[in-house]
Amino acid sequence: MKQRPSSSTAAIQAEAEVWFVRLRAYDCSAHERRAFEAWLAAAAEHADAYSETQRFWDSLDLLPHERDARRRHGQAGGTEALPGYGSALVWGGALAVAAAAACVAFGVRSTWPGRSMTASRDYSTAPGEQRELTLEDGSHLTLNTDTRVRVRVEGGSREVELMRGEALFDVAHEPGHPFHVRSGDITIADLGTSFDIRSDAADTWITLISGRATVTRDRDGAAVELAPGDQFISSATTWRKQTVADLAMVTDWSSGHLVFRAAPLRDVVAKVNRYGPPRLVIVDDSLGMLQISGDFRIGDTDALLHALQSALPIRVEKSSEGETRLYLRR
């Protein structure tokens, strides 16, 4: 999408509306998002027009195509989120499923620094949904399934609290204005990096993709420096750093993939179940150790089950409770 000259208020408003719709399209590209950021930063009038467009559609709750998509998928409530889409799966000695996800963007920019924001704002995704956010400082967040964050960008302070789930951060570099992410009793601080953080009831995993960051713990002030490829694990009994061999396996979900490399089936099932029904259950424990490698497309559970039955000694049964149970085929 090419930028057009802005000759009048009406023309700028029309451009804002085109961008708003384009950013929510399933095939929206990273190049287009960067072009949008350039357009947004080119003039204060562009940011004002986009904010006005966003407020208008927020007042209507959902764009028509989003509303229809939610009806088809039995979803309700929320904005700026669409379910992932599935397609074909192939098998070549190991499980391999191609992937894609809806491209959904949310962006509002104002002058940085020196703006004022009086309250924090929460963003969330339902099981199976993913969502992209562009914060007022230009930082990008991608929320994974069943995730909730609280965002505050105020004056020189940039803070996000991960209350549950997983998020991928691409932090805008702002000297003198560290970006802080809190999860439980730990805080991640950086100036301009990319990292993934996932939290459940017991554990938190922080994986640094690029740049440098510091992880600190509230109760004793312990601190750990992270370099690219480092993963930090924190829980009630764990406080340690390790090296990740394949960063793509950490961030696969952000492009609609679940990537496995000789992963036990029990781990595959646990990861797939994070994305919503049908819930997979391994009935025969011996199946849990069977190893799988490949790329699984989020949302294509039927294709996954077909491939499992074709390549492994697995029998699938659907229960009256809505579960899909995996048995050893004898």
Image (cartoon, grey):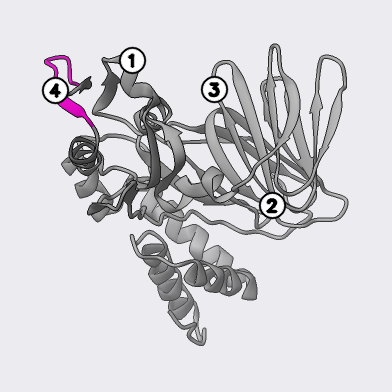
Mark 2 against mark 3, which lies toward the viewer?
Answer: 3
First reached walking from the N terminus: tag 2 or tag 3: 2
**Of pointers 1 and 3, the one earlier in the residue sequence:** 3
Q: Earlier in the sequence, mark 2 or mark 4?
A: 2
Residue flagged by tag 4: what amino acid is it?
Answer: Lys
* Marked residue nearer the N-terminal end (4 or 3): 3
Of tags 4 and 3, which is closer to the observer? 4
Residue topped by disc 4 = 318
Indicate which disc residue 285 carries: 1
| Proximity of marks 1 and 2: CB atoms separated by less than 8 Å | no
Marks 1 and 3, how far apart at CA: 24 Å
Residue 64 vs residue 265: left or right? left
Q: Which residues are magenta?
A: 313-324
Q: Secondary structure at mark 2?
A: loop
Residue 34 on image: x %, y %: 56, 69
At a point 31% along the width and 23% down the height, the residue shown is 287
Label 2 Cα neighbours within 10 Å, binned few <14 / some 14-19 / many ≥20: many
> What separation in Å lies between label 1 and label 2 (alpha carbons)?
42 Å
Residue on which the image places disc 2? 171
- Mark 3 = which residue? 200
Q: Are marks 1 and 3 in contact (CB under 8 Å)?
A: no
Q: Position of residue 155 (x, y in %)?
A: 78, 46
Residue 320 at x, y = what percent?
11, 15
Q: Tell me the kind of residue under disc 1.
A: Asp
Mark 4 in CB contact with mark 3 (< 8 angstroms): no
Comparing labels 4 and 1, the label whose residue is closer to the camera: 1
Observer-nearest of 172 and 118: 172
**Location of residue 230 by image quarter:** top right
- Image quadrant where one finds the C terminus: top left
